[in-house]
Amino acid sequence: MSQENTESNNPKIGHDEWVAQVASRQAQAYPLMRWWHALPGYGQWLMGLLGLALFLLVPIITANPLLLASFNLSNNNFILLTLNRFLIFAMLAIGLNVVVGYAGLLDLGYVAFYGLAGYFYAYLASNFVTAFSPNGIHLPSLVVIILIVAGVSLIGYLLGALSLRLSGDYLAIVTLGFGQVFTLLALSATRIYLPGRDRAVDFTRGPNGINGLDPLNFFGLSLNENWHYFYFFSLMLLLIYIMVYRINHSRIGRAWRAIRDDELAAEVMGTPTGRLKLLAFALGAGIAAFAGVLDAAWQSNVVPVPRYSVFTLINLYAMIVLGGIGSLPGAVIGAFIFTLLPEILRSVALASVIFYGLSLWGLYIFSGSWRRFGRLLAFGILFGFVLKGLLLLLNVARADLASSSALNSLIQSWLFIAEPYKVLGNVLTIVGILLVLALVIWRKHQTFSDILAVLGLYALAFAWETRLGLEPAATRILIVGLSLVLLMIFRPQGLLGKAEVRVV
């Protein structure tokens, strides 16, 4: 027998054909990903620089009077406020990704570092602390940033040292307790009696927070406008991104990933796991502190709830999960989606485009091929018109709804909207969600799943036109949450995360 035949009959040790085909299957399912990976290295960098250049032109582009009039805006401050919020959250997501995505440490007290930095900035750059001067303390911004980042990094290091022997759920409980203690202190540390003082001391001003913080000032140049902070935040995000990228591709980054995948094996191979875990805690806390200082100076105040609460922590985890845990560009993309999507959904017309676009995208992902997708879409359209014709023959009363866009008018001409449409909308909202869940459970049964897909598409369209599209506040939360759930079902590693295959 020849050597070639022997190799073909005996599989290679450690080689799994299914795992080896993951990249090709992903390329077939995601054409955009195939196009991106087909670009050479310099092509990806050029595309990234082009996107960055377009992003930096946003203040100039959005100042156009015609564009502002089309969105009923008098100026572009709202747009810049939203983008500045995205830049702050992108920095926070990168810092959390260092701790959770690279080192694999489930840190639920991360927002506390963000809040500590904000309050420290309020002490050192405002009129709040009058113990040393009646006009407060106003240190230079560069000095304040260095002191706060170093101090909060040290706190992160100490917290990591206290919980060094913990991992998994136990580490999560300890860090969550740290975060909750900080929030409670920020809300209640308003009347504290200290030894030797007759009057109570106010440390945080409670739920009202501390206002009137100094803007950032560097060598006589003060940042007072939103566009000033936009360009400064963009530069800082770029520097943080490059720094973390370099660390991740160094020996430290490789050691972090080894600890994340198998801490015991990494320790046996001589990796100083304890020291590297402390470094991850300190670096993540330092990045959160830096973002906290920038955010406090930009907004000129610190407020404990909701800025430093568990809701912010949930949003940050959702960002890195959506982008892909352990993916640096994924953290930025997740922050971008979760910051801008709720604001875009304030417009019913834009929300409708996104809702139906996501619905069709989900139908295509479920179908797996353009042929089946086209067949399901055709059956769905035919089902709607047949149902409408039958109800018209039965003389069922119709309700006329005002459409906010041409797309809504087109969808409403396909649906049969009967009275009481609000009650029916509530019912079909629940029915549509149940059909989607049933579709996930029984998707292997093709005929049954096709019927569920057609019925679910009709139910969700009816629910959107009669209830969800008319209540943007609730709909924004529902769409973001449903999108995240569907993504986790069909792509659990996130948008840019790497799929893992483990033997259980």
Image: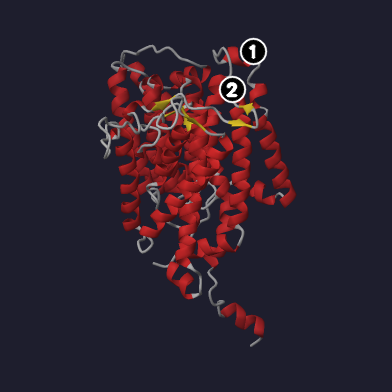
Q: Residues within 10 Å of mark 2 (few under 14, many from 20)?
A: few
Label 2 sits on residue: 225
Work out whether 279 lies above or below 33: below
Residue ID at (34%, 17%): 393
Residue type beneath disc 1: Pro
Give the quadrant of the N terminus: bottom right
Q: Is residue 315 visible?
A: no
Compare residues 384 and 486 and report the one nearer the observer: 486
- In the rendering, at what x and y percent does residue 315 appear? 42, 39
Separation of residues labelled 1 and 2 (CA atoms) = 19 Å
Q: How is the image coloured?
A: secondary structure
Q: Is residue 36 above or below residue 160?
A: above
At 64% across and 12% down in the image, what residue appears? 65
**Direction from residue 75 to residue 273 in the image, left or right:** left
314 or 133, which is in the foreground?
Answer: 133
The answer to whether 415 appears left or right of 31 in the picture is left
Residue 73 coordinates in the image, percent (x, y): 55, 14
Q: Name the side, left or right, on which 200 lies relative to 127.
A: left
Q: Nearer the viewer, residue 184 or 435?
A: 184
Residue at point 27% right, 38% down?
A: 196
Which amino acid type corresponds to the residue marked 2 in the rendered image? Glu
Helix, strand or loop under label 2: loop
Q: Is residue 397 visible?
A: yes
Residue 381: x %, y % from top left = 46, 29
* Residue position marked by numbered label 1 in the rendering: 65
Residue at 36% x, 58% y: name it.
Answer: 162
